[in-house]
Image (cartoon, rainbow, N blue to C red):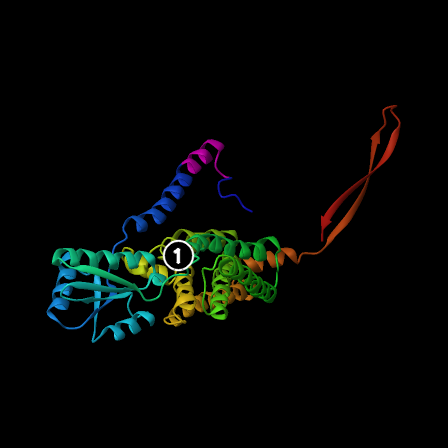
């Protein structure tokens, strides 16, 4: 691979890497730490039950305490609010009463959101001199009560999906598009099976709709790996770096896996849902806990990235422009090495001439 620093003297190379690499480290820390340090509700969809004086006072209190923090939906009764939570229309709902504030939440949609809702209800009840009752409508699995498995698994799942593309496109060097695509499909299916067996059979973190959840895992791996392989086919090794920036340094911290997209600063929460890691988190939460409610949009994002990746692989190999994959294919298609035999004369230690057979290779 061409070294872009080779034309510089060693001292200048040292200066460049001493500046560039620390900047990469700082950017990576900023990308991961900044969203986590600014978690707060931003247009968070919630429900409020009834149109009583208590309900109106509660909504006014929310707007005063955090303007633009909540997107309030009104429901006639608690049953309607519960259905909205189960359909993923809202994250939770409040039912203010004269002496008691009842809050309905769904920890499976995000434990951090459930905590935000509980805190809001508790603060209001404390000011009103009442009590709070919290009901978890869609709880997390008992084997993963804090949702840590998905949080811990997203980063290695993303990195390994990128490595799959690197293995197929760089290490194995499949120089035909259809072989790369077939390899990515096969590896994605097998890898998704292994991930599901660990995450659910062993750890119990994905308890419902096993077929749909496995399907979501397979699409996640395929979307990341195919997009990476497509970028490699177009740009060469630089495509691998670009994919790492998109999927790891942007996709993971902006995914909302540790909170929710509506708890992240604008616009990174929205951006994260257009990248495969964020779409995968929302999709897997929908399939594993909400009977696939709200899954279509996130699945569409993963399909779009997969289509882009497959198209990029094909264009990289067969397009009218000589992309990286076509250049590599042309290099691999050069003629076989031909032996070149030469005869030279040299002196032995005793001064007598001797014939030496020189072997070399010549590229046809």
Q: Is residue 136 left or right of residue 325?
A: left
On the image, the x and y values in percent for residue 44 come to 25, 63
* Residue occupying image coordinates x 44% and y 57%: 143
Specify whether residue 12 is painted magenta. Answer: yes
Q: Main secondary structure of the magenta part?
A: helix
On the image, the x and y values in percent for residue 213 come to 47, 67
Q: Is residue 196 left or right of residue 113?
A: right
Region in magenta: 7-18
Front position in the image: 20 or 102: 102
Label 1: which residue? Answer: 147
Q: Is residue 40 above or below residue 289?
A: above
Report crowding for label 1: few under 14, some 14 to 19, many 20 or more residues within 10 A (C-alpha).
Answer: many
Q: Is residue 89 above or below residue 330?
A: below
The part of the image, by quadrant, that contains residue 190 is bottom right
Q: Secondary structure at mark 1?
A: loop
Q: Is residue 55 left or right of residue 319?
A: left
The answer, for residue 320, to whether it is visible in the render is: no
On the image, the x and y values in percent for residue 243 come to 46, 55
The part of the image, by quadrant, that contains residue 333 is bottom right
* Residue occupying image coordinates x 14% and y 73%: 51
Front position in the image: 31 or 339: 31
The answer, for residue 77, to whether it is visible in the render is: yes
């Amino acid at each position: 691979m061409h070294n872009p620093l080779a034309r510089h003297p060693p001292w200048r190379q040292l200066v460049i890497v001493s500046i560039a690499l620390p900047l990469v480290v700082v950017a990576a820390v900023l990308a991961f730490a900044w969203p986590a340090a600014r978690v707060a509700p931003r247009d968070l969809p919630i429900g409020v039950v009834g149109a009583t004086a208590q309900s109106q006072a509660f909504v006014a209190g929310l707007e005063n305490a955090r303007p633009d923090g909540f997107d309030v939906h009104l429901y006639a009764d608690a049953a309607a609010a519960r259905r909205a939570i189960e359909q993923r229309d809202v994250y939770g709902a409040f039912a203010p009463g004269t002496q008691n504030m009842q809050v309905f939440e769904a920890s499976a949609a995000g434990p951090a959101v459930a905590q935000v809702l509980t805190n809001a209800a508790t603060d209001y009840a404390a000011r009103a001199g009442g009590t709070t009752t919290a009901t978890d409508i869609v709880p997390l699995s008992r084997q993963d009560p804090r949702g840590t498995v998905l949080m811990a698994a997203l980063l290695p799942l993303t990195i390994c999906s990128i490595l799959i593309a690197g293995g197929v496109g760089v290490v194995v060097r499949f120089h035909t598009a259809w072989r790369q695509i077939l390899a990515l499909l096969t590896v994605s299916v097998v890898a998704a099976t292994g991930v599901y067996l660990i995450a659910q059979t062993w750890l119990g973190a994905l308890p419902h709709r096993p077929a749909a959840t496995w399907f979501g895992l397979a699409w996640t791996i395929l979307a990341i790996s195919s997009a990476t392989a497509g970028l490699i086919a177009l740009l060469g090794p630089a495509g691998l770096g670009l994919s790492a920036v998109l999927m790891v340094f942007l996709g993971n911290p902006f995914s909302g896996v540790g909170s929710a997209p509506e708890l992240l600063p604008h616009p990174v929460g929205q951006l994260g849902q257009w990248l495969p890691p964020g779409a995968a988190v929302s999709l897997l939460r929908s399939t594993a806990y909400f009977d696939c409610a709200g899954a279509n949009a996130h699945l569409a994002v993963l399909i779009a990235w997969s289509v882009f990746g497959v198209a990029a692989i094909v264009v990289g190999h067969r397009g009218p422009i000589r992309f990286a994959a076509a250049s590599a294919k042309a290099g691999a298609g050069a003629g076989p090495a031909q032996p070149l035999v030469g005869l030279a004369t040299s002196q032995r230690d005793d001064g007598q001439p001797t014939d030496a057979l020189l072997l070399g290779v010549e590229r046809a």
